[in-house]
Amino acid sequence: MIANTEQVKNIKLVLFDVDGVLTDGSIFISEQGEIFKQFNVKDGLAIELLHRYGITTGVISGKTSPALTRRCQQLGFNIVITGCKNKLPKLHEIASVRGISFENIAFCGDDVLDLPVMNVCGLSISPADAHSLVLDSADWVMTLEGGRGMVREFADKLLTLQLGISLCEIYNPLMDKIKSDDVSGIHQ
């Protein structure tokens, strides 16, 4: 499926799976349990950009870990749901609480557990290395793999199409903050 311009312009909320989207899917485990996950700073800045342009963000992850909780806090996700394997009921809950329709929600997922949500959202996105069933279902398949800047690639594309302006124009407010040494609140 390919999302049309009107679908893209109506996106108000972007939700992400974590493992395989914000990370490369690797999980580092010791005898005490999961120790850490690797995130890409490029993707972190994408969340900053989405927020800057009024798009609410969140995660719905099948796993839970201290590393994930910390990263979600760092990036200021508006919605954080972890330890959730059946994501569709949570999507219904989010839409109801926020008073938003599914057509105004984008979801980035990489595996078959994400398909029920991807199939009802207004825009579905996958990394290049997603499961083949997800690749077949996604409106947009990014060129980058999960955990390798794919979220940034998506945010750039979404904002360019939504706002009808160039990437330079999208990044100008951020660059102005950096030039004036006002980097507080900028998270990677």
Image (cartoon, grey):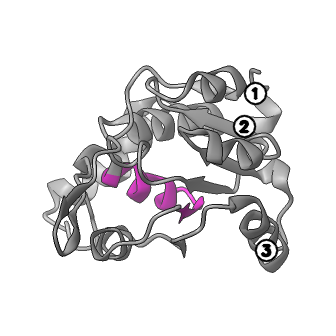
- Left/right placement of residue 90 relative to residue 15 reads right
* Residue 99 sits in quarter: bottom right
Image coords of residue 102 (percent x, y): 83, 54
Determine whether 24 is above or below 59 in the image: above
- Marks 2/1 in contact by CB < 8 Å: the verdict is yes
Disc 3/disc 1 C-alpha distance (Å): 24 Å
- Left/right placement of residue 119 relative to residue 44 reads right
On residue 122, the disc is none
Front in this rendered view, residue 111 or 122: 111
Residue on which the image places disc 2: 8
Disc 2/disc 1 C-alpha distance (Å): 7 Å
Image coords of residue 90 (percent x, y): 72, 69
**Amino acid type, mark 1:** Ala
Categorize mark 1 by other alpha carbons within 10 Å: few (<14), some (14-19), many (20+): few
Going from N to C along the chain, the mark reached first, 3 or 1, is 1
Going from N to C along the chain, the mark reached first, 2 or 1, is 1
**Amino acid type, mark 2:** Val
Q: Of the residues tagged 3 and 1, which is closer to the observer?
A: 3
Q: Of the residues tagged 2 and 1, which is closer to the observer?
A: 1
**Residue name at image x 83 percent, y 45 percent:** 120
Categorize mark 3 by other alpha carbons within 10 Å: few (<14), some (14-19), many (20+): few
**Amino acid type, mark 3:** Glu
Front in this rendered view, residue 114 or 165: 114
Categorize mark 2 by other alpha carbons within 10 Å: few (<14), some (14-19), many (20+): many
Q: In which quadrant is the N terminus drawn?
A: top right
Kind of element beneath mark 3: helix
Kind of element beneath mark 1: loop
Kind of element beneath mark 2: helix
- Marks 3/1 in contact by CB < 8 Å: the verdict is no
Please identify the residue farthest to the front as the structure is shown: 31
Residue on which the image places disc 1: 3
Residue on which the image places disc 3: 93
